[in-house]
Amino acid sequence: MKPLEILIEPSFESTMKEMGISPDEDYNSDAILFQQGYNMYHIEVEPGDKFKIKKNTKGQIDCSETPYKFIRKKEEWETEENLWEEEYEDEENISLAPGKYKFLEDGITIEEIN
């Protein structure tokens, strides 16, 4: 099975901070977006491996070639009725917030873990 490719994108705010720009200052948002794009990178995850999306970043998974599935962690306050069809997301792109995940052995499922 092929590895999962994840595009890691830094947040707008962390890019501003890295550039030494305060949110109170006047700034060129195009320059920040350019730098944010420049700071993106890919990671590869093999089936069965765990991985982490670091604070101040997010992960993007392209599902156009492989129909990946995402199982999000159920919050303590949620019941089965609250989840409905959201437990398994099947979309063109999957966005991963900072946190811990596992790429399951089936090669198509990403699970959010504690």
Image: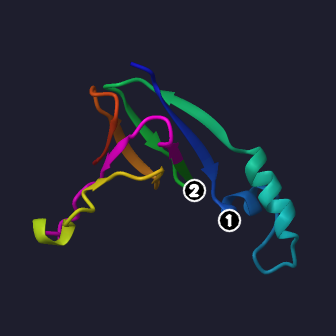
Q: Nearer the viewer, residue 84 or 114?
A: 84
| Residue corresponding to mark 1 | 13
Residue 54 belongs to the span the image colors magenta: no
Asked if disc 1 and disc 2 are in contact, CB closer than 8 Å, the reply is yes
Left/right of residue 102 with respect to residue 37 in the rendered view: left
Q: Going by the picture, which residue comes out furthest to the front?
A: 65
Q: Residue at x 52, y 48 (%)?
A: 59
Q: Nearer the viewer, residue 107 or 26?
A: 107
Q: Position of residue 86 (x, y in %)?
A: 27, 62
Alpha carbon distance from label 1 to label 2 = 8 Å
Quadrant of the image occupied by residue 40: top right
Give the magenta-colored segment's residue range.
60-79
Q: In terms of sequence position, does the residue under pointer 1 or pointer 2 come before the other?
A: 1
Residue 91 vertical position relative to residue 47 in the rendered view, above or below: below
The mark found on residue 58 in the picture is none
Identity, as a three-letter code, of the amino acid under mark 1: Glu
**Label 2 SS:** loop
